[in-house]
Amino acid sequence: MLGKIKAKSAHNDSLRMLMGKYGIGIVLLIMMVVIGIMEPAFATSNNFINVATQVAINGMISYGMCLAITTGGIDLAVGAQLALTSCVLGVTITNSGMNVWVSCFIALLVATLFGLLNGVLIAKFNMFPFVVTLSTQLIIRGLSQVISGGKAISLTSDVFKNIYSGKFLGMPIPIVILIIITIIMYLLLHWTKFGRYVFAVGGNVNAAIASGVSEFWTKVGVYTVSGFLAGVAAIIFTAKTGSAQSNIGIGYETDAVAACVLGGTSFAGGIATIPGVLMGIFIIGFIYNGMNLIGVSSYYQSIVKGCVIIGAVLLDMVMNKRNR
Amino acid sequence: MLEKNTDGKNEYILQCEGISKAFGGTQALKDVQLHVKPGEVHALMGENGAGKSTLMKIVIGLHKQDKGTITFEGKPYQVKGPVDAINAGIAMIHQELNPEPHLSIADSIFLKREDTVGKFFLNKKKQNERAGEILKQFNFPYGPKTLIKELTLAQVQMVEIIKAVSSDARMIIMDEPTSSLDSEETDHLFRVIRELKAKGVAIIYISHRMDEIFQICDTVSVFRDGMFITSAPLAQISRDELISKMVGRKVENVFPKVDCKIGDVVFKAENLCGKGFKDISFEVHAGEILGLSGLVGSGRSETMRAIFGLDPITSGKMYLEGKEIKNKNPRSAINKGICMVNEDRKNFGLCLLRSLRENISLPNLPKKQRGILINQRREIKECEEVAKQLTVKAASIEHEAFSLSGGNQQKVVIAKWIMANPKLLILDEPTRGVDVGAKSEIHSLMCQFAAKGMAIIMISSELPEIMGMSDRILIYHEGSINGEVTRAEILDSTATEEVILAKAFGGK
Ligand SMILES: Nc1ncnc2c1ncn2[C@@H]1O[C@H](COP(=O)(O)OP(=O)(O)OP(=O)(O)O)[C@@H](O)[C@H]1O
Ligand SMILES: [Mg+2]
C-alpha cells in the first residue's frame, strides 16, 4: 500500500493538536473557578466587563509582541511607544487644540513610523531585535520627555475621554476595539500571505527565502504592525487616565511577553496562535483582577504572576512532549 | 567481544522482539522484530514511513517503545538516550543530520565524550590531535578546527560517519548514510564498513539504493507499514523479490523515461561565473530533462543556486525564453517561472514546525488568494491533491512536517514546487531518501511535466538515475563543464557509467 491520506485518524489528531495548543485554556478555566469560589464578586458580568476593558491595552501590545516573537525577535520598545503616543496626543489636543480625531491619526502615524524604523533597522542591517528595540526604546522615551517637557499634560476633551468610558451598542469601546483588533489579527496571522510568511521566517528563514519569501518585508511589516498596535493601546490608555505622561508604560512589555508565552507563542519562532494569545491576555488580566478582589497586596501579585507563568509554561511543555 | 552461550542460542548481538510504537494516532511500528549478528551488515529496508528510523531511534533511546523487549549482547538492554547508547556500545548516524553549526569538527566528533583535564576542563589540544589523526585516516580534506558550518552537506555526512566509526561502538546504525555522498565517497564508506566487519562490529544499514544493498549487505530485514515482513540472507533473494516484499506489489520500471518532443530553448546560460563554478554555458529546451552529473562539490548545486537567485552571480548572462534575466532573489526567479528543489531539505526545503499544507503552499500563496485572504478551501483541496499524487504518507496535511519520515518530507518539498508549475524546474537530488515505488512515481511525473513543455534540470549523484532519466547529461569537473553525453549515446552504450565517471574525474 503506497501512501495515502488517511482521513479517519485526522479527526482524532486535530483534537490532540488542539489540546496541545490550547492546554492553556484549561489553566484559564481552573483559575477562574478557583478565584470565583474564593471571591463571589469575581464571577459577575460586571466584573468580567471590567476585566475585558482593562486587558484591552495589554491586548494590543501583546498581539504586536506575538508577531515579533513569532519571527524569532522581540519588541521591547512598546512601553516607550505608549509614552510617546500619549505625549503626542497631549501636545496636539491640549496644547495645540487640534481636532481629537486628527490628533489620534497623527499619534498613530508617529507610533507606526517608529515601528517601521525598528523593522528597517532589524531587517536591513540584520541586527538583533533585542538590541535594536532596547536602544530605540531609550530614544522614543527620551523624545516623549522632550515634547512633553517632562510634565503631565491633562486631557479634558470629553470626546477623547469617551474613547475609554463610552459605549458602542452597549459595550465599552475598549472591548469593541479589542474584538475588532482580535479579528483583524486572527485573519492577518492565519488567513493571509503575510501571516504565513511570518511563520515561515520564524520557523526556518532559509527555507522561507528559498520559497520566495522576503525576509526584509516580513520583518518590517511585523514591527510596523507592532508599533501601530502600541499606538492604539496608548490612545485607550490616555483616554482612561485623562493625562499624557512620558513615564507611562514602563514594564508593559513584560506583561505582553507573558501573555504571548502563556498563549503558546514559541520563543524559538514559528509557532503562535491568536486565540492562544487572547487567552494569555485574559489570564494576566484575571491574575491582577482576582488578586485585587481577594485583597492580595501588589508585592505578592508580582510573585504570583511569575509563578503562574512558569507553571503554565511547564505544563505546556509536558503536554507537548507527550504529543511529539 | 561477544561470547557465545554454551547452548549456542545467543548468536545475536541485537535482538528486538515484539516492538510496537504509536505517535498519537499513527501506529509507526506493530510488533516488529530484528535480529542482528555480530560482524554482519544487516540491511533494513522498507518504503518511506515503514518505521525503519523509528525502530532505530528506539534502539538508541530517542523514543521509547510502547511494547517489546530489546536484548543487546545477550543482556536486557535499556537506555535513556543516545549518550547512554554510545556507552553501551551502539552508535548511530542519523538520516536527518543535525549538527551544531558553530562547533569545530573535532568538537563535533568528540561531543559528549570530550577529553578532559581533571573533571571539567576540556583538553582541546589532545582532542584536536586525536581528531586530526582520525580525519587523516579518512582522507578528509579539512582539519579538526574547521567549523561545521563551513562544510557541505556531504562533508557533514562524512563527519557524522567518522564520529560514529571512531566511537569504538560494537554496533553502528547507519540511517541512509550515503544519501548525499557521491560514488567515490560511498566507496570509501564501504571500505570502512568492511574493516569494521572484519573487527566483528555489527552494522545496521538503511538505504533506498538497491545497488548498495546488494553490494555491501549480508542479510536483509524488510518492513512494510510498520510491520515486519521477512528476513533473509541477501544471497537468497533477488532484487525484484526484495522490491515486491517492500512495496507489496511489483514496481515495473524505476526509470519510466518517456521520450517527448524537444521544443524551443527555454533557458540559456552564457559564461556564468560565481563561487564554486566558472564559465558555465548551456541550454535547456522545452520537454527536455537535462542531467547534471559530477562529483559532490563539483559546482553543480552552486550553479543552480545562483541561477535560482540564492547566491550571487559574478559574471555571465542568463536568458529565459530569449529574454535576458537577472535573479536577485528566489522570489524574482519564482515569479519568472524558475523553481528549484534544494538538495538540503532540512535547511532550505521545509519549515519543520509548520504543517504540510503551509509548507506546500508557501511559494504558491500569491496564486491562492481571494482578495487579501487565502482561499483555504481551495488551498486544502489542491494540497491534498499533490500530496496524493506524490504518495505522501501522512495522516493529514495538517500535521507538522517533522512528524513525517525522511522520504515523505522529500516528497513534500517536491510537491510544493510541482504546484508552482514552472517553466524551468531545477531538481537537486530530487529522490534522495525516497523509496523505489515513489521514486518511479516522481520519475514518471517528471516525464509528464516534460511532455507538457516544462524544461527540467536534474542533479543527481546516483548514476543510474541520471542515465535513466536524462535526454542529455552535462558532466561537471571542478566547477566547469567537462563533457556532454546524449541519450542516444547512452542507449547505444557508447556512453557507459565508466565514461561518465572518467569525465567527472577530469578525463576526456
Ligand atoms: N515524531 C513523530 N511524530 C509523529 N509521527 C512520527 C514521528 N516520527 C515518525 N512518525 C511516523 O511514523 C512512521 C514511521 O516513520 P519512520 O521515520 O520510522 O519511517 P522510515 O521507515 O524511516 O521512512 P524513510 O524511508 O522515509 O526514512 C511515519 O508514518 C511517520 O509519519
Ligand atoms: Mg527514515
Image: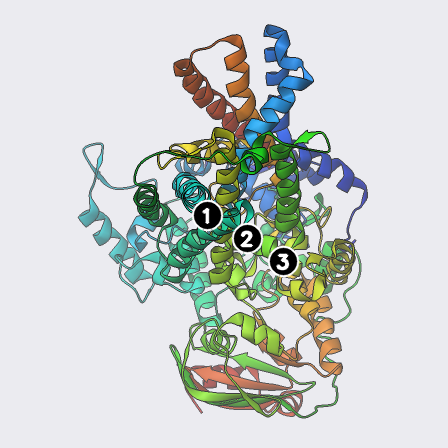
Is residue B420 among what the camera can see? yes
- The answer to which image quadrant residue B333 occupies is bottom right
Secondary structure type for disc 3: helix
Secondary structure type for disc 1: loop
Disc 3, ligand 1: is the CB inside 8 Å?
Answer: no
Q: Earlier in the sequence, mark 2 or mark 3?
A: 3
Q: Are marks 1 and 3 on the same chain?
A: yes
Report the front residue among A219 and B224. Answer: A219
Mark 1: amino acid: Gly
Q: Residues within 10 Å of mark 2 (few under 14, many from 20)?
A: many
Cβ atoms at labels 1 and 3 below 8 Å apart: no
Report the residue marked by disc 3.
A193
Mark 2: amino acid: Val
Report the residue marked by disc 2.
A198
Which of labels 1 and 3 is toward the front?
3
Distance between the alpha carbons at the discs numbered 1 and 3:
18 Å
- x and y percent of residue A294 in the render? 53, 9
Residue A72, numbered label: 1
- x and y percent of residue B383 in the render? 73, 58
Tag 2 subunit: A
Disc 2, ligand 1: is the CB inside 8 Å?
Answer: no
Instruction: Identify whether B398 is placed above or below A244.
Output: below
Tag 3 subunit: A
Q: Are marks 2 and 1 on the same chain?
A: yes
- x and y percent of residue A219 in the render? 48, 56
Mark 3: amino acid: Lys
Report the front residue among B107 and B247. Answer: B107
Secondary structure type for disc 2: helix
Distance between the alpha carbons at the discs numbered 2 and 1:
9 Å
- The answer to which image quadrant residue B471 occupies is bottom right
Q: Earlier in the sequence, mark 1 or mark 3?
A: 1
